[in-house]
Image: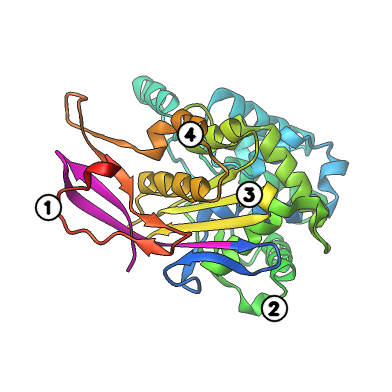
Amino acid sequence: MPQLVVRTRSGRVESIHHGYICVTDSDGKIKYSIGNPNARIFIRSSGKPIYANAFVMSGAMEKFNISLKELAILCASHGGQAFHRRIIRGILKKAGLTEKDLDCGHKYPENQKVHDALIKKGKRPDPIFSNCSGKHAGLLVLCKYYGFPVKGYTDPQHPIHQVIRTTIAEILECSTNDLITGVDGCTLPTYSFSLHQASYLYALLAHGDTHKGKYAHSFGLIQKAMIENPRVIKGDDSFCTSLIKVTKGRAIGKIGAEGIYCMAVPEKRLGVCIKLMDGHPWASYPVAVRVLEELEILDDADIKELDKWALPKVKDDKGRDVGYLHPVFSIINNETGHYEPGDIYPKEVN
């Protein structure tokens, strides 16, 4: 399996992260790939901007006066900050719902400050703190729009999920019977796609409303919502938010659990899907930066601003730098590194 990232300690390779990358254009043509582009993955939270097409196409935005910022939270894996929670309460209120209707579990928020504040208070997080509560709020509003029961909306057999499945199948031009589902961490269904399919879906997000087809407008609106509201997509001190901000929307990144990272590149109408097979989220960030660098989306100044994710530092227990996570591949030349634990890492890459 291709090596994408090595973790070093004191100048030597300590760990190796293997994985796959696929870059696809909005016509569905693979432009670059490392590893098997037909390998299947659960898209996890990277699927949120895709599922949001069902919301935009329904008419629920107009009926409930949903703003672009509120649409962005449907696409987010947010950190549970106060402003995230306010946006979600606002969406629910517009449809006559409350946060008590959320059924996404009691996951601690991913923003460290919010997490630590709850621990200090000895408080169990309410479902609204879940990084998926925006997606859940969107589904609840869709239930109200279609007249579906709110209770039991997380059940895979609930009619709201037929709406989502139909939307995905139409975009991919396949049958709903062809879609493979699993259970996501937030208890909702997640979908298994090939890397090729996932990167194609993000290429459609990149192309937006100038693409042909039924979903061009909705992809365009979702793209606009994410670019205009980067802080909503993840939150302070996060790669997803920083990437959109630094590039001014030239790259839209969306993390998924277990080493998934997907990106839309609007100016080149490309979609990217990255999968780290060991599920390491931090290792996906330097991969994403390297891909964008090779696609000439990031320049040296951009990479410097994204330094903490482009070359994540390994620290000892006193906070001293003892190593790095280095990308060791080229999508342009379709090459990957070949290192063994204990190798001295090439000086020119340090």
As measured in the structure, the alpha-carbon distance from the residue carrying label 2 to the one carrying label 4 is 44 Å
Q: Residues within 10 Å of mark 1 (few under 14, many from 20)?
A: few
**Relative height, residue 285 to residue 191 (above, below):** above
Magenta stretch in the rendered image: 1-23
Residue 32 lies in magenta, yes or no?
no
Label whose residue precedes the other's in the sequence (1 or 2): 2
CA gap, disc 1 and disc 2? 49 Å
Question: Pointers 1 and 3 in contact (CB under 8 A)?
Answer: no
Give the colour scheme of this rendering.
rainbow
Which label was assigned to residue 342?
Answer: 1
- Amino acid under label 3? Val
In front of the other: label 4 or label 3? 4
Q: x, y (%) of residue 39?
A: 46, 72
| Amino acid type, mark 1 | Gly
Q: Residues within 10 Å of mark 4 (few under 14, many from 20)?
A: few
**Label 4 belongs to which residue?**
300
Sequence-wise, which precedes: disc 2 or disc 3? 2
Toward the viewer: 210 or 139?
210
Tag in front: 1 or 4: 4
Eye-nearest disc, 2 or 3:
3
Q: Mark 2: give few (<14), some (14-19) or many (20+) Cα within 10 Å.
A: few
Residue 265 - label:
3
Q: Residue at x 81, y 51 (%)?
A: 209
Magenta span: chief secondary structure: strand
Along the polypeptide, which appears first: circle 4 or circle 3? 3
Q: Earlier in the sequence, mark 2 or mark 4?
A: 2
Q: What number is the disc on residue 175? A: 2
